[in-house]
Image: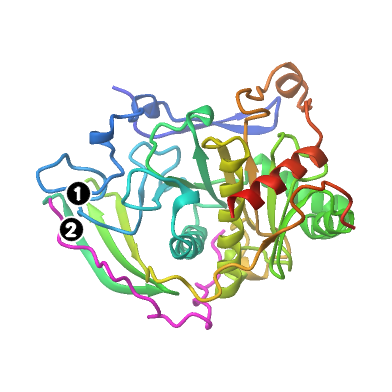
Amino acid sequence: MRPSVSEQRFNELRGEHVVYAIHRQDRTFLPDRAHCPLDPTKPGGPQTEIPFDAFQIAVFDNRFPSFEAPSGAAEVVVYTDEHDGSFATLSPARVEALMWVWRHRYEELGARPDVDYVMIFENRGVEVGVTLHHPHGQIYGYPFLPPVPTLELAADERLGGCAPCELLQRELADGRRVLLESDTVVAYVPEAARWAYEVHVVMREHRASLLDCDGAELRELAATLQALVRGYDALFQRPFPYVMVVHQAPTAAAPVSVTPHGHLHVEFYPPLRTAEKLKFLAGSEQGAGTFISDTLPEETAAALREAIARAV
Amino acid sequence: MAVGPAQPPSPEQPPNAGSSERAPQPPHTDDTSQEAVGEHYGPLELTRIRKDDGRSLILYGHDEQPPPQAGNASATESDDGCDRA
């Protein structure tokens, strides 16, 4: 019998936690369409995770959690009761509602004493390990501060202020990699992107988290995210795999709304470097931690701008 | 470790604005118990359910009408790739 809880160990050589969630080895893996656990439960049909015949957005505790109380959280966010589609095909109103759901979950999970960092994310495509095709994302509540937000805090120290604010100003001044911009939100391929089509969607004003955003800002964030993912799909005329991660202030310090650290932005890490070729994390990336890229951010940004315009 | 008091939803969004037009119907199974109905968060209406195995399920409803002035982000020049600064 496999243990149902995760075990955390600390890798001293790398200075980071490793989580052993071996019960996840048996999780549902690419079920046929009739047995999707994220579909609504239809009369006479198989029972799913959502025992209603219709819903709009549903959030539930992951049946196969990497983290769970009293040592973190793992939730599933189902975007729609329609099995087919994606973030790109949702109605604009649904995407805007999803921003509020994200805000609500950040607020509730972040208030828990066993959650130091709330990470909202979506894995899209089998290329990044998706096991369920139904449009959905996930939320992890880490009981510790993971390495990436730790690095972001270190960047704040190195740059003498909010790093995303500084980097946004540099991108706007350069302009070559900017994809979308409004009074509220800017999307760009970062100057030192690690992935060919990596994009950062950044709040123009300093906002530590979704809690600091008003309704208009959330609406604009939703519109920008959807314009981007529609452009991704148009780029190679195929569903575009990506990992999408919402970066926000850590929640270990109280209160979140006044912490000087953290700047709400959404990062996309797409594994494709061409329509058919994947970027693999191989020798240099894994052994040295240094990405070797086959593309230039200025060139991929130009291609993405054209694709976004085509997708409108 | 915990954050401060819960932040209220934005005053721009009245608590009951755009409540769901498709409130959940009774479940088709007996393995859940509905705990609360009618909670609101910004434009969302929440229904909290505790599944029999103890896991939490929250259903969020909202108005599916297109929001006014939805999104004014605009693509920058699409095909020149030149310096826009």
Is B25 contained in the magenta span? yes
Subunit that carries the residue with mark 1: B
Question: In the image, is residue B38 above or below residue A74?
Answer: below
Task: Answer yes or no: is residue A144 visible.
Answer: yes
First-in-chain label (1 vs 2): 2
Expressed as whole percent of the image width and height from the top left, the position of residue A184 reads: 69, 68
Q: Nearer the viewer, residue A136 or A287?
A: A136
Q: Give the prevailing secondary structure in the magenta stretch.
A: loop
Pick the quarter of the image with the N terminus of chain A. top left
Q: Which residue is found at the position 15% from the left and 49% from the top?
A: B31
> Disc 1 to disc 2, how far (Cα)?
7 Å
Q: Which residue is mark 2?
A: B33
Question: In the image, is residue A25 above or below residue B16?
Answer: above
Q: What is the crowding at mark 2: few (fewer than 14 residues within 10 Å), some, or many (at least 20)? A: few
Disc 2 is placed on an element classified as: strand
Expressed as whole percent of the image width and height from the top left, the position of residue A31 reads: 30, 29
Residue found at the far top of this picture? A283
Amino acid type at image mark 1: Asp
Expressed as whole percent of the image width and height from the top left, the position of residue A105 reads: 46, 59
Q: Nearer the viewer, residue A247 or A198?
A: A198
Q: Which mark is residue B52?
A: 1
**Range of residues picked out in magenta:** B1-28
Q: Which residue is found at the position 34% from the left and 29% from the top?
A: A27
Q: Quadrant of residue A191?
A: top right
Expressed as whole percent of the image width and height from the top left, the position of residue A111 reads: 50, 62
Is A32 contained in the magenta span? no
Subunit that carries the residue with mark 2: B
Question: In the image, is residue B23 above or below residue A105?
Answer: below
Q: Relative to A18, is A32 on the left or the right?
A: left
